[in-house]
Amino acid sequence: MQKLTIATFFWYIFPVLLLFVSSIIIKKMSLERKYGIKAPDIATPFLLVGIHYLSKMTFDESFLPYTLLIVLLVSMLIAVFQAYQFKEIKYKRYLKMVWRIVFLITLLIYFLLIIASIILYLN
């Protein structure tokens, strides 16, 4: 049975804190105006680290390799879609789209891990 510890609780609130802190950093350094960087762009690598630690604490196995495989498959699908739709791949548009979709995938997997962790704690 899994125990609810302070570390587990930290990983539960980690995405909210991460998005809050990264949005403050973006505003203080005015990165959005200069480079077009938004809070999810900074939060994505940290969410990948969070997926590793939360899955390791919950299931004693890291889901990071599976997450990276999903990300690679989705990025290939985006490349095929852009090549078919626009008859060319503009790298700036491609990388921006992939990075934002990676954020959505990591956030979804992270919240699924939180739900699984809570369910295992309650059982």
Image (spheres, grey):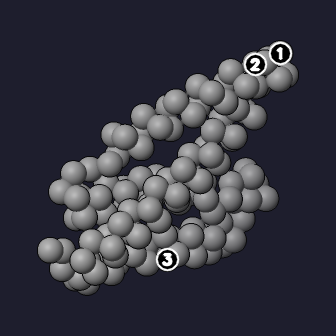
Tag shown at residue 17:
3
Please provide percent x and percent y for residue 69. Answer: 42, 34
| Amino acid of disc 2 | Ala
Asked if residue 53 shows in the view, the reply is no
Q: Are marks 1 and 2 in contact (CB under 8 Å)?
A: yes
Please provide percent x and percent y for residue 84. Answer: 78, 18
Instruction: Please report whichever mark, 2 or 3, sits nearer to the chain's N-terminal start.
Output: 3
Please provide percent x and percent y for residue 35. Answer: 73, 50
Which marked residue is nearer to the observer: mark 3 or mark 1?
1
Q: Quadrant of residue 89?
A: top right
Tag shown at residue 83:
2
Asked if residue 120 shows in the view, the reply is yes
Q: Which residue is mark 1?
A: 87
Seen as rendered, the residue at the extreme right is 86
Left/right placement of residue 106 relative to residue 61 reads right
| Amino acid of disc 1 | Lys
Q: How far, Cα to Cα, is label 2 from label 3? A: 37 Å
Task: Pick the residue in front: 10 or 35.
Answer: 10
Q: Measuring 42% from the left and 39% from the top, which residue is drawn there?
A: 68
Seen as rendered, the residue at the extreme left is 1
